[in-house]
Image: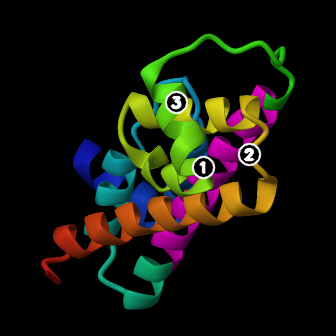
Amino acid sequence: MLIETLTNFFAGEGGIWALCASAFLSATILPGSSEAILTAALASSAESSRTLLLVAAASLFNTLGSMTSWCIGRFFPDRLPSAPAIERLRRWGAAALFFAWVPVVGDMLPLAAGWLKIKFWPALFWTAAGKSARYSALAAAVLNIL
């Protein structure tokens, strides 16, 4: 009964909204489980058009969460502590944000990028590219496309 209820939830509109909320929160320092929710939503629906919608929603909201962290970082004082991660981000610039999807470490990259005043559009591009690649790879693995 519980499994059927959860399957119906994730196959319907509730699954998309739960995925959006989780993807947004997962990109911040708050805990989230967007990968688990995406997997459940993909497993409960075999429609290919829904697969694209789910991957796009997860990518979009996870990117929005990261860019919210970027905005918060813009308000930090200009004085930065010296750390190897900060120096790498300075060296690689916005392209380092491709790895904002990496668990734990990736959550801090957009915050640090905002702190370092990395420009918005390149930060958005590289963040979205990395997040989209991650969710696409996860969907492909779940659906046995690879």
Expressed as whole percent of the image width and height from the top left, the position of residue 3 reads: 24, 48
| 52 is higher (above) or lower (below) than 29 | below
Q: Which residue is mark 1?
A: 93
Bin the neighbour count of mark 3 within 10 Å (Cα to Cα): few under 14, some 14-19, many 20 and up.
few
- What residue is disc 2 on? 118
Horizontally, residue 44 falls left or right of residue 108, namely left
Q: Are the two marked residues, 2 and 1, in contact with CB atoms closer than 8 angstroms? A: yes
| Residue range of the region highlighted in magenta in the rendering | 53-73
Residue appearing at x 46%, y 70% in the figure: 55
The x, y position of residue 82, in whole percent, is: 56, 14
Figure quadrant of residue 69: top right
Q: Residue at x 17, y 83 (%)?
A: 145
Q: Amino acid at mark 1?
A: Gly
Q: Is residue 17 visible?
A: no
Q: Residue at x 71, y 46 (%)?
A: 67
Quadrant of the rendering where the C terminus is positioned:
bottom left
- Residue 69 magenta: yes
Q: Position of residue 53 (x, y in %)?
A: 53, 77
Judge left or right: residue 13 versus residue 75: left
SS type, badge 2? loop
Q: Tell me the number on the disc at residue 87.
A: 3
Q: Amino acid at mark 3?
A: Glu
| Lateral position of residue 136 relative to residue 76, left or right | left
Residue nearest the observer in this picture, 46 or 132: 132
Labels 2 and 3: the sequence-earlier one: 3
2 or 3: mark nearer the eye: 3
SS of the residue at dot 1?
Answer: helix
- Of labels 3 and 1, earlier in sequence is 3
Please indicate, yes or no, whether residue 66 appears anywhere in the rendered image.
yes
Gap in angstroms between the C-alphas marked 2 and 3: 13 Å
